[in-house]
Image (cartoon, rainbow, N blue to C red):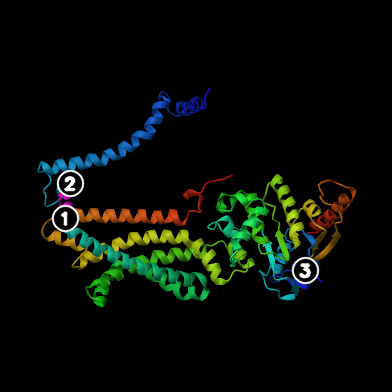
């Protein structure tokens, strides 16, 4: 008897005990093929219903543009340069704010993670500040920084700095003390210990923090650009609201969605590259 | 001339009786010494002081600068490849080549680029041995290094340690609670009792010591007695 036959019989036995009467071959195929199709089918169906509703005049265009109209608008915004320009501005703000948050968050995390005094000085204020909803600071930021680029970038940086700081701090504090002890028996210098033991050991937590930070920076950006801005995706959407252009608003929403998705993929890629040593990320397992 | 000289070493934690009580111990260069004692007898305390992990408050320790420790767990950095773990902190240009050479010695020449989390327990412990030896220590301390391994792997590791010791010629201090392990490997077995070296036996058996002999049985009985008596007293 071949190995496949034995395996099929084994599966058949398992399935007959669970669901009598269904043939094992069908069950296995269904388990692999159908969910994929089913998962795609449902959103597609919604899209079709949406388009049909708009075409039939059941959904007024000033409340919700049709998918076809959104696609056309997307294309024309792309062609006349409106979308690339505003997207560039938004990406610039998010990127700069995030970069500031990374530098400040890692700096503060290192100070409070590596020294007792540093923790006493840095950690308490950070823990108090993080409970403040950053968006509530918008009025204050406008008073402080006016309505230029500064308040928007500052808002992104402020929102993103906490997850980075908190996770790095947790990662450093959570290091296996046995590894630090080992580093001492090897006579590693403090700089070597930080570079080879502390930072790589805290990196998984730092990346978790970074992922949160990226998500939060988009959120901050949306608010900052809708409150007062002369450019950016948020401004483009607020402008569209004045002219009842739901199609442009929907394009903006789609862009935000894609940006969120794309940046999440980027962080996942970073994790796969930087944490290649973890067995879950592909290093071959050996008994 | 000695590799290690400990004089009047005392260590206490709080109000409890001293864990180490005016302990004296001298280890000759190149000697293989086994340190026995039941759990809580202060073996690890002594080892930490010798390794420089804790500060000496009472008494005196003379030891070479080149000291390496292998712990019960391999304590490898999971984010560094095997050879990088071995070469950790070695800044000279040929650190990588030396790491390769030592890994070859412990039989892991084919795993130099592996991630530590993909190693078996015995392999990880061999990497830890390589990491200790690449520093060319004058004193190699082994803190129950085989305790977490299965019986077969343990026997292979014991043979490996014996070979490496013969080749590198460093003094070895093996902390163990296994009398047979001590008798297989060591020239000298000392038992830590009530904070001092109680029993101190010369193990003068021909190597390799795989077979039982009346001399070995006698030593075994005496060591077990030294350990047992104390266990009952405690």
Q: Which residue is at the front of the view, B84 or A23?
A: B84
Q: Earlier in the sequence, mark 2 or mark 1?
A: 2
Count residues near mark 3 (Cα–Cα under 10 Å), then give few for <14, some for 14-19, many for 20+: some
- Give coordinates of residue B204: x percent, y percent: 87, 56
Can residue A178 be spotted in the picture?
no
Marks 1 & 3, CB-CB < 8 Å contact: no
The part of the chain drawn in magenta is A70-76
Marks 2 & 3, CB-CB < 8 Å contact: no
**Magenta span includes B6:** no
Q: Quadrant of residue A95?
A: bottom left
Letter of the chain that mark 3 sits on in the rendering: B
- Give coordinates of residue B62: x percent, y percent: 75, 73
Question: What is the C-alpha distance between the residues marked 2 and 1?
Answer: 18 Å
Looking at the rendered structure, whether the residues under marks 1 and 3 are on a common chain is answered as no
Q: Quadrant of residue B72?
A: bottom right
- Number of residue marks: 3
Residue assigned mark 2: A67
Residue assigned mark 3: B3
Looking at the rendered structure, whether the residues under marks 2 and 1 are on a common chain is answered as yes
Question: What is the C-alpha distance between the residues marked 2 and 3?
Answer: 82 Å
**A101 sits to left or right of A249:** right
**B127 sits to left or right of B156:** left
Numbered disc 3: secondary structure:
loop
Instruction: Give residue A79's mark.
Output: 1
Q: Which residue is at the front of the view, A88 or A105?
A: A88
**Magenta span includes A71:** yes
Q: Quadrant of residue A180?
A: bottom right
Count residues near mark 2 (Cα–Cα under 10 Å), then give few for <14, some for 14-19, many for 20+: some
Eye-nearest disc, 2 or 3: 3
């Amino acid at each position: 008897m071949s190995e496949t036959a034995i395996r099929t019989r084994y599966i058949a036995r398992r399935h007959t005990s669970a669901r009598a009467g269904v043939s094992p071959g069908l069950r296995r195929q269904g388990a692999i093929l159908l969910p994929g199709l089913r998962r795609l089918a449902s959103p597609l169906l919604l899209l079709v219903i949406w388009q049909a509703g708009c075409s039939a005049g059941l959904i007024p265009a000033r409340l919700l543009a049709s998918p076809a109209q959104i696609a056309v608008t997307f294309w024309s915004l792309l062609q006349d340069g409106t979308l690339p320009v505003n997207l560039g501005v938004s990406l610039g703000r998010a990127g700069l704010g995030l970069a500031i948050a990374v530098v400040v968050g890692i700096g503060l995390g290192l100070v409070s993670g590596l020294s007792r005094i540093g923790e006493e000085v840095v950690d308490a204020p950070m823990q108090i500040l993080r409970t403040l909803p950053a968006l509530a600071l918008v009025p204050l930021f406008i008073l402080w920084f006016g309505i230029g680029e500064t308040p928007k970038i500052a808002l992104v940086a402020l929102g993103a700095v906490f997850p980075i700081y908190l996770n790095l701090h947790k990662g450093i504090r959570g290091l296996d003390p046995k590894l630090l002890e080992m580093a001492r028996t090897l006579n590693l210098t403090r700089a070597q210990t930080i570079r080879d033991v502390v930072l790589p050991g805290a990196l998984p937590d730092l990346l978790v923090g970074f992922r949160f930070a990226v998500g939060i920076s988009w959120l901050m950006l949306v608010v900052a650009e809708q409150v007062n801005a002369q450019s950016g995706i948020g401004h483009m959407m607020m402008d569209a609201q004045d002219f009842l252009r739901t199609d442009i608003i929907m394009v903006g929403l789609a862009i935000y969605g894609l940006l969120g998705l794309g940046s999440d993929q980027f962080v996942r890629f970073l994790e796969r590259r930087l944490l290649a040593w973890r067995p879950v990320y592909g290093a071959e397992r050996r008994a | 001339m000695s590799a290690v000289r400990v004089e009047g070493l005392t260590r206490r934690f709080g109000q409890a009786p001293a864990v180490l009580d005016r302990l004296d111990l001298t280890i000759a260069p190149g000697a293989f010494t086994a340190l026995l004692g039941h759990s809580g007898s202060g073996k690890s305390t002594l080892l930490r002081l010798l390794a420089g992990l804790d500060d000496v408050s009472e008494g005196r320790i003379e030891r070479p600068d080149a000291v390496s420790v292998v712990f019960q767990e391999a304590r490898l950095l999971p984010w560094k490849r095997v050879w990088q773990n071995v070469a950790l902190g070695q800044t000279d240009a040929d650190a990588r080549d030396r790491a390769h050479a030592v890994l070859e010695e412990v039989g892991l020449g084919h795993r130099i680029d592996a991630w530590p989390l993909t190693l078996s327990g015995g392999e990880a412990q061999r990497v830890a041995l390589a990491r200790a030896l690449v520093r060319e220590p004058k004193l190699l301390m082994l803190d129950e290094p085989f305790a977490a391994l299965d019986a077969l792997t343990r026997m292979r590791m014991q043979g490996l340690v014996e070979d490496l010791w013969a080749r590198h010629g460093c003094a070895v201090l093996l902390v163990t609670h296994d009398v047979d392990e001590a008798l297989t490997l060591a020239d000298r077995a000392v038992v830590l009792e009530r904070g001092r070296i109680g029993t101190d036996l010369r193990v003068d058996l021909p190597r390799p010591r795989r077979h039982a002999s009346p001399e070995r049985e006698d030593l075994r009985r005496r060591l077990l007695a030294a350990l047992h008596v104390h266990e009952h007293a405690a």
